[in-house]
């Protein structure tokens, strides 16, 4: 899911040996897995097609670990965030912005198109590309674009979005609903056969969620006294695991408490209902799997984008939205009991979730990058002849 550092496509395709002909692509964005992992999926597709690809990011973000591990070159820049920071830090970052932007302008030599997932690390390379008239394709997975994509939205070659509502933030005719790259295993999850107690999967991401962990713990006595049995699978994150595992074992409830779920598609396949945050990755995986959900947005996400994501999915009939401040044991027990005792409602929600799914997002992004690069190279050639 979006909070996990987990690849969104099947295993990495090895780079082709030796220099490759054709256009050169720059992948911009970093800081979090939500920015890096989808860009890696697109980069793998471009490399599979024989193109050269490199990344621009920071040395302290997750890209410093994930990008080299996939065999791609990472060019590091020094840039800080602008969203949800103090006034002094924002001024300091803006005052330094020309320096990484100038550095990125040099990195753009030979680049035919730029792909951006947004985030503060994308700012300098995207600004440099726009100044040099190199086409920029952005992928905006959230219902409301992040700061960087809002700033440069009207100048992009194409914006690839996950929700039709997001098109309002970009010029008419420049958006396409592609969705976010999601591992193919999520799309191939079959409907769960009937039988046995309904399974509820609860996850706050790889590091866990204090709100969800607290609510789950508070709900156990209510499930013990409840008439309808359920099976609870709870990913706690590493910090809370030891305490919650012991307490859960004492309840006698069916299920398991684990620190991390390695095979999340398998966990989705076994679940009748998923309770989770509403980052773009989580929402995309739920859609691909066709799973009904209870979404609890992380309240401190930039621009409150998780709440906006959850609102769109709830309006589509695929989820129930509970604000972080309202989530507790009683609320969790009430919603889980209501939904798991209404299989026809869960089925309708699952069907509604499928309507948000968009297979082939990485392939479509690669198609558009190739188109933009071809057009750029055609227009760049006459300019080069004129200069000579």
Image (tube, grey):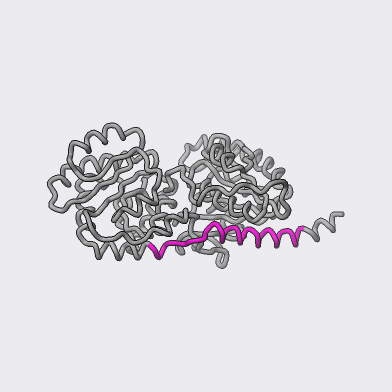
Q: Position of residue 239 (x, y in %)?
A: 34, 33
Q: Position of residue 171 (x, y in %)?
A: 56, 63
Seen at 63% across and 58% down, the residue is 369
Is residue 227 on the magenta stretch?
Answer: no
Q: Quadrant of the C terminus?
A: bottom right
Seen at 52% across and 59% down, the residue is 361
Q: Position of residue 57 (x, y in %)?
A: 59, 41
Q: Is residue 112 above or below residue 96?
A: below
The answer to whether 244 appears left or right of 133 in the picture is left
Is residue 371 on the magenta stretch?
Answer: yes
The answer to whether 72 appears left or right of 88 in the picture is right
Q: Is residue 97 above or below residue 346?
A: above
Q: Position of residue 110 (x, y in %)?
A: 73, 50
Q: Nearer the viewer, residue 320 or 14?
A: 14
Let me know if residue 306 appears in the view: no
- Residue 353 quadrant: bottom left
- Residue 286 quadrant: bottom left
Q: How many marks?
A: 0
Q: Nearer the viewer, residue 366 or 267?
A: 267
Query: What predominant SS class does the magenta segment belong to?
Result: helix
Q: Residue furthest bottom?
A: 173
Chain part drawn in magenta: 354-380
Q: Residue furthest right?
A: 388
Let me know if residue 206 appears in the view: yes
Q: Nearer the viewer, residue 344 or 321?
A: 344
């Amino acid at each position: 899911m979006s909070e996990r550092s987990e690849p969104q496509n099947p295993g990495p395709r090895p780079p082709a040996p030796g220099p490759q002909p054709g256009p050169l692509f720059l992948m911009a964005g970093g800081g979090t897995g939500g920015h890096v992992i989808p860009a890696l999926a697109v980069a793998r597709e471009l490399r599979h097609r024989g193109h050269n690809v490199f990344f621009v990011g920071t040395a302290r973000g997750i890209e410093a670990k994930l990008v080299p591990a996939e065999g791609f070159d990472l060019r590091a820049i020094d840039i800080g965030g602008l969203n949800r920071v103090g006034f002094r830090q924002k001024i300091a970052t803006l005052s330094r912005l020309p320096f990484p932007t100038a550095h990125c302008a040099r990195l753009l030599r030979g680049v035919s198109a730029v792909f951006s997932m947004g985030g503060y690390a994308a700012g300098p390379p995207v600004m440099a590309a726009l100044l040099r008239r190199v086409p920029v394709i952005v992928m905006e997975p959230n219902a409301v674009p992040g700061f960087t994509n809002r700033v440069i939205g009207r100048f992009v070659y194409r914006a690839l979005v996950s929700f039709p509502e997001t098109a309002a933030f970009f010029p008419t005719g420049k958006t396409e609903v592609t969705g976010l790259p999601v591992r193919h295993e999520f799309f191939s999850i079959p409907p769960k056969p009937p039988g046995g107690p309904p399974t509820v999967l609860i996850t706050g991401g790889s590091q866990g969620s204090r709100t969800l962990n607290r609510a789950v713990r508070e709900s156990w006595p209510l499930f013990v006294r409840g008439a309808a049995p359920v099976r609870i699978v709870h990913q706690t994150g590493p910090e809370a695991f030891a305490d919650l595992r012991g307490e859960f074992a004492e309840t006698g409830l069916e299920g398991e408490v684990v620190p991390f779920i390695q095979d999340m598609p398998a966990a989705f396949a076994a679940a009748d209902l998923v309770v989770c945050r509403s980052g773009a990755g989580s929402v995309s995986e739920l859609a691909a799997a066709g799973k009904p959900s209870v979404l609890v947005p992380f309240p401190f996400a930039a621009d409150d984008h998780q709440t906006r994501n959850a609102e769109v999915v709830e309006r589509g009939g695929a989820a129930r939205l509970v604000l972080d401040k309202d989530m507790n044991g009683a609320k969790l027990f009430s919603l889980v009991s209501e939904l798991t005792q209404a299989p026809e409602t869960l089925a309708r929600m699952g069907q509604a979730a499928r309507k948000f799914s968009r297979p082939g997002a990485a392939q479509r992004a690669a198609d558009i990058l190739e188109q933009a690069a071809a057009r750029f190279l055609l227009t760049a050639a006459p300019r080069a002849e004129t200069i000579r």
